Amino acid sequence: PASAVVAPGGDIAVAGVSLAELAERYGTPAYVLDEDEVRARARAWRRALPDAEVVYAAKAFLCRAVVDWVEEEGLGLDVCSAGELELAATRGFPADRIVLHGNAKSPQDLRTALRLGVGRIVVDSACEIARIAAQVPGPDPQRVLVRVLPGIEAGAHAKVRTGAEGQKFGLSIADGDAADAVARILGQSPLELAGLHCHLGSQITDAEPYAEAVRRVVAFLADIRDRHGVTLPELDLGGGFAVAYLPGDPAPAPGVYARSITEALAEACARYGLPLPRLTVEPGRSIMAQAGIALYRVLAVKRTGGRVFVAVDGGMSDNPRPALYGARYTVRRVGRASAAPMRTATVVGRHCEAGDVLAEAVELPEDIRAGDVLAVPASGAYQVSMASGYNMTGRPPVIAVSAGRSRLLIRRETFEDLRQRDVGL
Ligand code: LLP
Protein backbone atom coordinates (compact mmCIF):
# COMPACT_ATOMS: atom_id res chain seq x y z
CA PRO A 1 0.00 0.00 0.00
CA ALA A 2 0.99 3.63 -0.48
CA SER A 3 1.23 4.03 3.30
CA ALA A 4 3.96 1.38 3.70
CA VAL A 5 7.14 2.73 5.29
CA VAL A 6 10.29 0.64 5.70
CA ALA A 7 12.05 1.34 9.00
CA PRO A 8 15.87 1.16 9.38
CA GLY A 9 15.55 -1.89 11.68
CA GLY A 10 13.91 -3.87 8.88
CA ASP A 11 10.34 -3.50 10.05
CA ILE A 12 7.59 -2.19 7.78
CA ALA A 13 4.79 0.06 8.98
CA VAL A 14 1.49 0.12 7.12
CA ALA A 15 -0.91 2.95 7.97
CA GLY A 16 1.43 3.60 10.90
CA VAL A 17 1.17 0.03 12.25
CA SER A 18 4.20 -2.27 12.53
CA LEU A 19 3.85 -5.51 10.58
CA ALA A 20 6.22 -7.26 13.01
CA GLU A 21 3.94 -6.27 15.88
CA LEU A 22 0.85 -7.42 14.00
CA ALA A 23 2.47 -10.83 13.40
CA GLU A 24 3.24 -11.03 17.11
CA ARG A 25 -0.20 -9.90 18.27
CA TYR A 26 -2.47 -11.78 15.84
CA GLY A 27 -0.22 -14.68 14.93
CA THR A 28 0.57 -15.90 11.42
CA PRO A 29 -0.43 -16.52 8.73
CA ALA A 30 -2.49 -13.34 8.71
CA TYR A 31 -3.79 -10.85 6.19
CA VAL A 32 -3.49 -7.11 6.81
CA LEU A 33 -5.79 -4.71 4.97
CA ASP A 34 -5.12 -0.97 4.72
CA GLU A 35 -8.57 0.59 4.97
CA ASP A 36 -7.50 3.97 3.60
CA GLU A 37 -5.90 2.35 0.57
CA VAL A 38 -9.16 0.53 -0.24
CA ARG A 39 -11.11 3.75 0.13
CA ALA A 40 -8.59 5.75 -1.93
CA ARG A 41 -8.74 3.24 -4.77
CA ALA A 42 -12.53 3.21 -4.67
CA ARG A 43 -12.51 7.00 -4.90
CA ALA A 44 -9.97 6.94 -7.73
CA TRP A 45 -12.39 4.86 -9.79
CA ARG A 46 -15.27 7.23 -9.05
CA ARG A 47 -13.13 10.22 -10.01
CA ALA A 48 -11.99 8.54 -13.24
CA LEU A 49 -15.57 7.89 -14.33
CA PRO A 50 -17.70 10.52 -12.59
CA ASP A 51 -20.82 9.76 -14.64
CA ALA A 52 -20.54 5.99 -14.33
CA GLU A 53 -21.60 3.61 -11.64
CA VAL A 54 -18.61 1.92 -10.02
CA VAL A 55 -19.54 -1.49 -8.67
CA TYR A 56 -17.03 -3.30 -6.46
CA ALA A 57 -16.63 -6.99 -7.37
CA ALA A 58 -17.14 -8.67 -4.00
CA LYS A 59 -15.45 -11.91 -5.09
CA ALA A 60 -12.06 -10.20 -4.71
CA PHE A 61 -12.68 -10.00 -0.93
CA LEU A 62 -15.74 -9.27 1.16
CA CYS A 63 -16.48 -8.93 4.85
CA ARG A 64 -18.90 -6.68 6.72
CA ALA A 65 -16.40 -3.84 7.14
CA VAL A 66 -15.70 -3.85 3.40
CA VAL A 67 -19.44 -3.69 2.70
CA ASP A 68 -19.51 -0.50 4.80
CA TRP A 69 -16.44 1.03 3.15
CA VAL A 70 -17.87 0.37 -0.32
CA GLU A 71 -21.23 1.82 0.69
CA GLU A 72 -19.66 4.92 2.26
CA GLU A 73 -17.52 5.56 -0.82
CA GLY A 74 -20.64 5.51 -3.00
CA LEU A 75 -19.91 2.33 -4.94
CA GLY A 76 -22.27 -0.48 -5.86
CA LEU A 77 -21.64 -4.15 -5.19
CA ASP A 78 -21.25 -7.03 -7.66
CA VAL A 79 -22.21 -10.30 -5.97
CA CYS A 80 -22.52 -13.82 -7.30
CA SER A 81 -24.11 -15.82 -4.51
CA ALA A 82 -26.79 -15.72 -1.84
CA GLY A 83 -23.94 -15.70 0.69
CA GLU A 84 -22.45 -12.45 -0.63
CA LEU A 85 -25.96 -10.99 -0.87
CA GLU A 86 -26.83 -11.94 2.71
CA LEU A 87 -23.59 -10.45 3.99
CA ALA A 88 -24.33 -7.17 2.21
CA ALA A 89 -27.86 -7.25 3.64
CA THR A 90 -26.56 -7.58 7.21
CA ARG A 91 -25.14 -4.05 6.79
CA GLY A 92 -28.22 -2.71 5.04
CA PHE A 93 -26.33 -2.18 1.77
CA PRO A 94 -28.77 -0.46 -0.64
CA ALA A 95 -30.18 -3.29 -2.76
CA ASP A 96 -30.67 -1.10 -5.82
CA ARG A 97 -26.86 -0.72 -5.99
CA ILE A 98 -26.34 -4.51 -6.12
CA VAL A 99 -25.71 -6.47 -9.33
CA LEU A 100 -26.18 -10.26 -9.22
CA HIS A 101 -23.98 -12.36 -11.49
CA GLY A 102 -23.55 -16.05 -12.07
CA ASN A 103 -23.58 -18.60 -14.86
CA ALA A 104 -25.41 -21.06 -12.60
CA LYS A 105 -27.60 -19.17 -10.16
CA SER A 106 -29.06 -21.44 -7.52
CA PRO A 107 -32.72 -21.21 -6.48
CA GLN A 108 -31.45 -19.67 -3.24
CA ASP A 109 -29.35 -17.06 -5.10
CA LEU A 110 -32.38 -15.93 -7.11
CA ARG A 111 -34.79 -16.08 -4.19
CA THR A 112 -32.49 -13.92 -2.07
CA ALA A 113 -31.85 -11.43 -4.87
CA LEU A 114 -35.54 -11.03 -5.65
CA ARG A 115 -36.51 -10.79 -1.99
CA LEU A 116 -33.94 -8.04 -1.37
CA GLY A 117 -34.83 -6.32 -4.65
CA VAL A 118 -31.38 -6.08 -6.24
CA GLY A 119 -30.84 -3.40 -8.86
CA ARG A 120 -29.92 -5.75 -11.69
CA ILE A 121 -29.73 -9.47 -12.31
CA VAL A 122 -27.32 -10.37 -15.08
CA VAL A 123 -28.74 -13.02 -17.41
CA ASP A 124 -26.09 -15.52 -18.43
CA SER A 125 -28.14 -18.19 -20.20
CA ALA A 126 -31.45 -18.36 -22.07
CA CYS A 127 -32.90 -20.96 -19.73
CA GLU A 128 -32.81 -18.69 -16.68
CA ILE A 129 -34.98 -15.97 -18.26
CA ALA A 130 -38.34 -17.63 -17.66
CA ARG A 131 -37.12 -18.83 -14.27
CA ILE A 132 -36.33 -15.29 -13.11
CA ALA A 133 -39.54 -13.88 -14.63
CA ALA A 134 -41.69 -16.45 -12.83
CA GLN A 135 -40.28 -15.45 -9.43
CA VAL A 136 -40.50 -11.65 -9.58
CA PRO A 137 -42.46 -10.94 -6.40
CA GLY A 138 -44.26 -7.61 -6.82
CA PRO A 139 -45.88 -5.62 -9.59
CA ASP A 140 -42.62 -3.83 -10.45
CA PRO A 141 -40.51 -5.48 -13.14
CA GLN A 142 -37.05 -6.78 -12.19
CA ARG A 143 -34.30 -5.02 -14.09
CA VAL A 144 -31.91 -7.38 -15.90
CA LEU A 145 -28.81 -7.07 -18.06
CA VAL A 146 -27.83 -9.59 -20.72
CA ARG A 147 -24.25 -10.78 -20.40
CA VAL A 148 -22.91 -10.85 -23.93
CA LEU A 149 -19.81 -12.60 -25.12
CA PRO A 150 -17.94 -10.16 -27.34
CA GLY A 151 -15.37 -12.73 -28.54
CA ILE A 152 -12.28 -10.95 -27.22
CA GLU A 153 -9.18 -12.67 -25.83
CA ALA A 154 -7.86 -10.68 -22.87
CA GLY A 155 -6.58 -11.44 -19.39
CA ALA A 156 -3.51 -12.75 -17.64
CA HIS A 157 -4.29 -16.45 -17.86
CA ALA A 158 -6.55 -18.77 -19.88
CA LYS A 159 -8.47 -19.54 -16.69
CA VAL A 160 -9.65 -15.93 -16.34
CA ARG A 161 -10.35 -15.09 -20.02
CA THR A 162 -14.11 -14.80 -19.84
CA GLY A 163 -14.66 -12.69 -22.95
CA ALA A 164 -13.49 -15.31 -25.43
CA GLU A 165 -15.70 -17.68 -27.39
CA GLY A 166 -15.71 -21.25 -26.18
CA GLN A 167 -15.83 -20.71 -22.37
CA LYS A 168 -18.79 -20.96 -20.07
CA PHE A 169 -19.83 -17.32 -19.53
CA GLY A 170 -22.22 -15.09 -21.42
CA LEU A 171 -24.26 -15.29 -24.59
CA SER A 172 -22.40 -15.09 -27.86
CA ILE A 173 -23.08 -12.08 -30.09
CA ALA A 174 -21.55 -13.90 -33.05
CA ASP A 175 -23.74 -17.01 -32.69
CA GLY A 176 -26.95 -15.04 -32.27
CA ASP A 177 -27.49 -16.35 -28.74
CA ALA A 178 -27.38 -12.84 -27.29
CA ALA A 179 -29.99 -11.61 -29.81
CA ASP A 180 -32.29 -14.53 -28.95
CA ALA A 181 -32.01 -13.77 -25.24
CA VAL A 182 -32.79 -10.08 -25.83
CA ALA A 183 -35.92 -10.98 -27.82
CA ARG A 184 -37.01 -13.41 -25.15
CA ILE A 185 -36.57 -10.90 -22.30
CA LEU A 186 -38.43 -8.18 -24.21
CA GLY A 187 -41.39 -10.57 -24.33
CA GLN A 188 -41.45 -11.07 -20.54
CA SER A 189 -43.39 -8.35 -18.75
CA PRO A 190 -42.01 -9.13 -15.26
CA LEU A 191 -38.57 -8.26 -16.64
CA GLU A 192 -37.18 -4.92 -17.73
CA LEU A 193 -34.17 -5.14 -20.02
CA ALA A 194 -31.93 -2.38 -18.66
CA GLY A 195 -28.91 -3.04 -20.84
CA LEU A 196 -25.95 -5.23 -21.69
CA HIS A 197 -23.05 -6.55 -19.67
CA CYS A 198 -19.71 -8.01 -20.64
CA HIS A 199 -16.68 -8.99 -18.62
CA LEU A 200 -13.58 -9.68 -20.65
CA GLY A 201 -11.33 -11.31 -18.10
CA SER A 202 -9.03 -10.41 -15.26
CA GLN A 203 -5.64 -8.72 -14.85
CA ILE A 204 -5.96 -7.05 -18.28
CA THR A 205 -2.90 -4.84 -18.60
CA ASP A 206 -3.99 -2.48 -21.36
CA ALA A 207 -7.08 -0.51 -22.25
CA GLU A 208 -7.50 -1.49 -25.89
CA PRO A 209 -9.54 -4.68 -25.27
CA TYR A 210 -12.10 -2.51 -23.44
CA ALA A 211 -12.31 -0.10 -26.37
CA GLU A 212 -12.81 -3.05 -28.72
CA ALA A 213 -15.49 -4.49 -26.43
CA VAL A 214 -17.27 -1.13 -26.45
CA ARG A 215 -17.25 -1.07 -30.28
CA ARG A 216 -18.67 -4.60 -30.51
CA VAL A 217 -21.27 -4.15 -27.82
CA VAL A 218 -22.45 -0.76 -29.12
CA ALA A 219 -22.84 -2.30 -32.58
CA PHE A 220 -25.06 -4.88 -30.92
CA LEU A 221 -27.01 -2.12 -29.10
CA ALA A 222 -27.67 -0.58 -32.52
CA ASP A 223 -28.80 -3.97 -33.78
CA ILE A 224 -31.28 -4.25 -30.92
CA ARG A 225 -32.63 -0.78 -31.66
CA ASP A 226 -33.05 -1.59 -35.36
CA ARG A 227 -34.73 -4.91 -34.66
CA HIS A 228 -36.93 -4.04 -31.67
CA GLY A 229 -37.12 -0.27 -31.62
CA VAL A 230 -35.70 -0.07 -28.08
CA THR A 231 -32.65 1.86 -26.92
CA LEU A 232 -31.13 0.16 -23.92
CA PRO A 233 -29.93 2.64 -21.30
CA GLU A 234 -27.04 0.79 -19.59
CA LEU A 235 -23.71 -0.68 -20.59
CA ASP A 236 -21.79 -2.60 -17.92
CA LEU A 237 -18.21 -3.37 -18.96
CA GLY A 238 -17.28 -5.61 -16.03
CA GLY A 239 -13.91 -5.50 -14.30
CA GLY A 240 -10.49 -6.95 -14.99
CA PHE A 241 -8.23 -3.93 -14.50
CA ALA A 242 -4.65 -4.95 -13.77
CA VAL A 243 -2.50 -4.33 -10.74
CA ALA A 244 1.29 -4.69 -10.32
CA TYR A 245 2.36 -7.82 -8.48
CA LEU A 246 6.04 -7.37 -9.36
CA PRO A 247 7.90 -4.07 -9.73
CA GLY A 248 7.47 -2.88 -13.30
CA ASP A 249 4.33 -4.90 -14.02
CA PRO A 250 2.05 -2.81 -16.24
CA ALA A 251 -0.86 -1.48 -14.19
CA PRO A 252 -2.58 1.48 -15.86
CA ALA A 253 -4.33 3.96 -13.57
CA PRO A 254 -8.16 3.98 -13.63
CA GLY A 255 -8.02 7.17 -15.69
CA VAL A 256 -6.19 5.39 -18.51
CA TYR A 257 -8.86 2.71 -18.85
CA ALA A 258 -11.56 5.34 -18.37
CA ARG A 259 -10.28 7.56 -21.18
CA SER A 260 -10.06 4.70 -23.63
CA ILE A 261 -13.54 3.45 -22.73
CA THR A 262 -15.26 6.85 -22.86
CA GLU A 263 -13.60 7.78 -26.16
CA ALA A 264 -14.56 4.49 -27.78
CA LEU A 265 -18.08 4.85 -26.42
CA ALA A 266 -18.55 8.40 -27.73
CA GLU A 267 -17.22 7.40 -31.13
CA ALA A 268 -19.27 4.22 -31.46
CA CYS A 269 -22.49 5.86 -30.27
CA ALA A 270 -22.00 8.74 -32.72
CA ARG A 271 -21.44 6.24 -35.54
CA TYR A 272 -24.76 4.49 -34.88
CA GLY A 273 -26.71 7.57 -33.81
CA LEU A 274 -27.26 6.18 -30.31
CA PRO A 275 -27.44 8.23 -27.11
CA LEU A 276 -24.62 7.53 -24.64
CA PRO A 277 -25.65 4.67 -22.37
CA ARG A 278 -25.01 4.94 -18.66
CA LEU A 279 -21.73 3.19 -17.99
CA THR A 280 -21.00 0.69 -15.22
CA VAL A 281 -17.63 -0.83 -14.32
CA GLU A 282 -16.94 -3.61 -11.83
CA PRO A 283 -13.37 -3.40 -10.52
CA GLY A 284 -12.44 -5.94 -7.87
CA ARG A 285 -8.71 -6.59 -7.88
CA SER A 286 -7.76 -3.00 -8.66
CA ILE A 287 -9.54 -1.79 -5.51
CA MET A 288 -8.42 -4.54 -3.14
CA ALA A 289 -5.14 -6.20 -4.20
CA GLN A 290 -2.66 -3.47 -3.26
CA ALA A 291 -4.39 -2.79 0.05
CA GLY A 292 -3.59 -6.27 1.38
CA ILE A 293 -0.43 -7.84 2.77
CA ALA A 294 -0.01 -11.48 3.73
CA LEU A 295 2.16 -12.22 6.77
CA TYR A 296 3.82 -15.59 7.34
CA ARG A 297 6.37 -17.00 9.73
CA VAL A 298 9.25 -19.10 8.46
CA LEU A 299 9.08 -22.66 9.80
CA ALA A 300 11.99 -24.28 7.96
CA VAL A 301 14.87 -23.44 5.63
CA LYS A 302 16.31 -26.16 3.46
CA ARG A 303 18.91 -26.38 0.69
CA THR A 304 18.30 -29.13 -1.78
CA GLY A 305 18.78 -29.76 -5.47
CA GLY A 306 20.77 -26.55 -5.75
CA ARG A 307 17.88 -24.46 -4.41
CA VAL A 308 17.06 -22.78 -1.13
CA PHE A 309 13.53 -23.46 0.10
CA VAL A 310 12.02 -21.17 2.70
CA ALA A 311 8.93 -22.89 4.09
CA VAL A 312 6.25 -20.82 5.83
CA ASP A 313 3.18 -21.48 7.97
CA GLY A 314 0.65 -20.75 5.18
CA GLY A 315 0.55 -21.64 1.52
CA MET A 316 -1.89 -22.72 -1.15
CA SER A 317 -4.75 -22.91 1.36
CA ASP A 318 -4.62 -19.13 1.86
CA ASN A 319 -3.17 -18.24 -1.56
CA PRO A 320 -3.97 -20.66 -4.37
CA ARG A 321 -3.06 -18.11 -7.07
CA PRO A 322 0.49 -19.26 -7.83
CA ALA A 323 -0.68 -22.87 -8.17
CA LEU A 324 -3.74 -21.94 -10.23
CA TYR A 325 -2.47 -19.18 -12.50
CA GLY A 326 1.31 -19.20 -12.11
CA ALA A 327 0.91 -15.89 -10.26
CA ARG A 328 4.14 -14.18 -9.14
CA TYR A 329 4.79 -12.21 -5.94
CA THR A 330 7.56 -10.37 -4.14
CA VAL A 331 8.47 -11.31 -0.57
CA ARG A 332 10.22 -9.26 2.14
CA ARG A 333 11.49 -10.14 5.54
CA VAL A 334 10.11 -7.83 8.25
CA GLY A 335 11.22 -7.06 11.77
CA ARG A 336 14.86 -8.12 11.51
CA ALA A 337 17.56 -6.30 9.62
CA SER A 338 21.00 -7.76 8.98
CA ALA A 339 24.00 -7.13 6.83
CA ALA A 340 23.60 -10.55 5.21
CA PRO A 341 23.73 -10.48 1.42
CA MET A 342 20.62 -11.37 -0.54
CA ARG A 343 20.29 -14.73 -2.24
CA THR A 344 17.67 -16.34 -4.41
CA ALA A 345 15.16 -18.53 -2.63
CA THR A 346 11.85 -20.24 -3.26
CA VAL A 347 9.15 -19.54 -0.70
CA VAL A 348 6.95 -22.59 -0.26
CA GLY A 349 3.92 -23.35 1.86
CA ARG A 350 3.27 -26.08 4.39
CA HIS A 351 0.82 -28.12 2.35
CA CYS A 352 1.29 -31.66 1.14
CA GLU A 353 2.19 -31.13 -2.47
CA ALA A 354 5.19 -30.01 -4.46
CA GLY A 355 3.08 -27.40 -6.26
CA ASP A 356 2.53 -25.51 -3.01
CA VAL A 357 4.92 -22.71 -3.96
CA LEU A 358 4.11 -19.14 -2.90
CA ALA A 359 6.94 -17.32 -4.68
CA GLU A 360 9.59 -18.57 -7.07
CA ALA A 361 13.03 -16.98 -7.25
CA VAL A 362 12.70 -14.18 -4.73
CA GLU A 363 15.60 -12.37 -3.11
CA LEU A 364 15.85 -12.92 0.65
CA PRO A 365 18.69 -12.30 3.11
CA GLU A 366 21.12 -15.21 3.34
CA ASP A 367 20.62 -15.46 7.13
CA ILE A 368 16.90 -16.15 6.80
CA ARG A 369 15.88 -18.63 9.49
CA ALA A 370 12.93 -20.23 11.24
CA GLY A 371 11.00 -17.62 13.21
CA ASP A 372 11.51 -14.79 10.73
CA VAL A 373 8.39 -13.01 9.52
CA LEU A 374 7.78 -12.59 5.79
CA ALA A 375 5.44 -10.11 4.15
CA VAL A 376 3.86 -10.59 0.72
CA PRO A 377 2.45 -7.37 -0.73
CA ALA A 378 -0.41 -7.13 -3.25
CA SER A 379 -2.29 -9.85 -1.37
CA GLY A 380 -5.68 -8.18 -0.89
CA ALA A 381 -7.58 -9.77 -3.78
CA TYR A 382 -8.56 -13.38 -4.48
CA GLN A 383 -6.50 -14.86 -1.66
CA VAL A 384 -8.59 -14.81 1.51
CA SER A 385 -11.72 -15.03 -0.67
CA MET A 386 -10.35 -18.18 -2.31
CA ALA A 387 -8.88 -19.71 0.85
CA SER A 388 -9.67 -23.36 1.44
CA GLY A 389 -9.71 -25.84 4.28
CA TYR A 390 -6.90 -27.96 2.83
CA ASN A 391 -5.00 -29.95 5.46
CA MET A 392 -7.25 -28.48 8.19
CA THR A 393 -4.82 -25.67 8.89
CA GLY A 394 -7.62 -23.15 9.51
CA ARG A 395 -8.14 -20.05 7.42
CA PRO A 396 -6.17 -16.93 8.42
CA PRO A 397 -7.51 -13.82 10.14
CA VAL A 398 -7.95 -10.48 8.40
CA ILE A 399 -6.81 -7.37 10.26
CA ALA A 400 -7.66 -3.82 9.22
CA VAL A 401 -5.15 -1.04 9.78
CA SER A 402 -5.89 2.66 9.69
CA ALA A 403 -4.33 5.75 11.27
CA GLY A 404 -1.92 3.85 13.51
CA ARG A 405 -4.48 1.36 14.81
CA SER A 406 -5.36 -2.23 14.01
CA ARG A 407 -8.58 -4.18 14.45
CA LEU A 408 -9.63 -7.72 13.72
CA LEU A 409 -12.13 -8.04 10.85
CA ILE A 410 -12.15 -11.83 10.48
CA ARG A 411 -10.78 -14.05 13.24
CA ARG A 412 -8.62 -17.08 12.59
CA GLU A 413 -10.51 -20.30 11.90
CA THR A 414 -9.86 -22.64 14.81
CA PHE A 415 -9.85 -26.38 15.13
CA GLU A 416 -13.05 -25.98 17.12
CA ASP A 417 -14.72 -24.30 14.09
CA LEU A 418 -13.69 -27.25 11.94
CA ARG A 419 -14.73 -29.84 14.50
CA GLN A 420 -18.18 -28.31 14.92
CA ARG A 421 -19.05 -28.92 11.29
CA ASP A 422 -18.07 -32.55 11.61
CA VAL A 423 -21.47 -33.72 12.88
CA GLY A 424 -21.54 -37.43 12.08
CA LEU A 425 -19.93 -40.45 13.65
N1 LLP B 1 -17.22 -8.63 -12.91
C1 LLP B 1 -17.38 -9.94 -13.19
C2 LLP B 1 -18.63 -10.36 -13.83
C3 LLP B 1 -16.39 -10.85 -12.86
O1 LLP B 1 -16.56 -12.14 -13.14
C4 LLP B 1 -15.20 -10.40 -12.23
C5 LLP B 1 -14.14 -11.34 -11.87
C6 LLP B 1 -15.08 -9.02 -11.94
C7 LLP B 1 -16.11 -8.17 -12.31
C8 LLP B 1 -13.88 -8.44 -11.25
O2 LLP B 1 -12.69 -8.65 -11.92
P1 LLP B 1 -11.35 -7.96 -11.39
O3 LLP B 1 -11.50 -6.48 -11.56
O4 LLP B 1 -11.19 -8.30 -9.97
O5 LLP B 1 -10.29 -8.54 -12.24
N2 LLP B 1 -9.41 -15.62 -9.14
C9 LLP B 1 -8.77 -14.93 -10.25
C10 LLP B 1 -9.62 -13.81 -10.77
C11 LLP B 1 -11.00 -14.26 -11.17
C12 LLP B 1 -11.88 -13.13 -11.60
C13 LLP B 1 -13.29 -13.58 -11.73
N3 LLP B 1 -14.21 -12.58 -12.10
C14 LLP B 1 -7.41 -14.44 -9.79
O6 LLP B 1 -7.06 -14.64 -8.63
O7 LLP B 1 -6.66 -13.88 -10.59
Image (cartoon, helix red, strand yellow):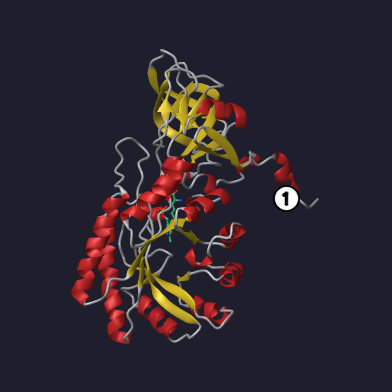
**Is the residue 348 above or below the residue 72 in the image?**
above
Q: Farthest residue in the right direction?
A: 425
Residue 232: quarter of image = bottom left
Q: Residue at x 39, y 50 (%)?
A: 43
Q: Quadrant of ligand 1?
A: bottom left
**In the rendered image, which quarter contains the N terminus?**
top left
- Residue 153, horizontal then vertical, whole percent: 31, 58
Tell me if I can see residue 196 in this picture. yes
Residue 24: quarter of image = top right
Disc 1 CB within 8 Å of nearest ligand 1 atom? no
Q: Is residue 278 left or right of residue 71?
A: left
Which one is in front, 92 or 237? 92
Which one is in front, 146 or 194? 194
Which one is in front, 17 or 26? 17
Type of the residue with mark 1: Arg
Tell me if I can see residue 286 in this picture. no
- Residue 18, horizontal then vertical, whole percent: 51, 27
The residue singled out by tag 1 in the image is 421
**Is the residue 266 above or below the residue 259 in the image?**
below
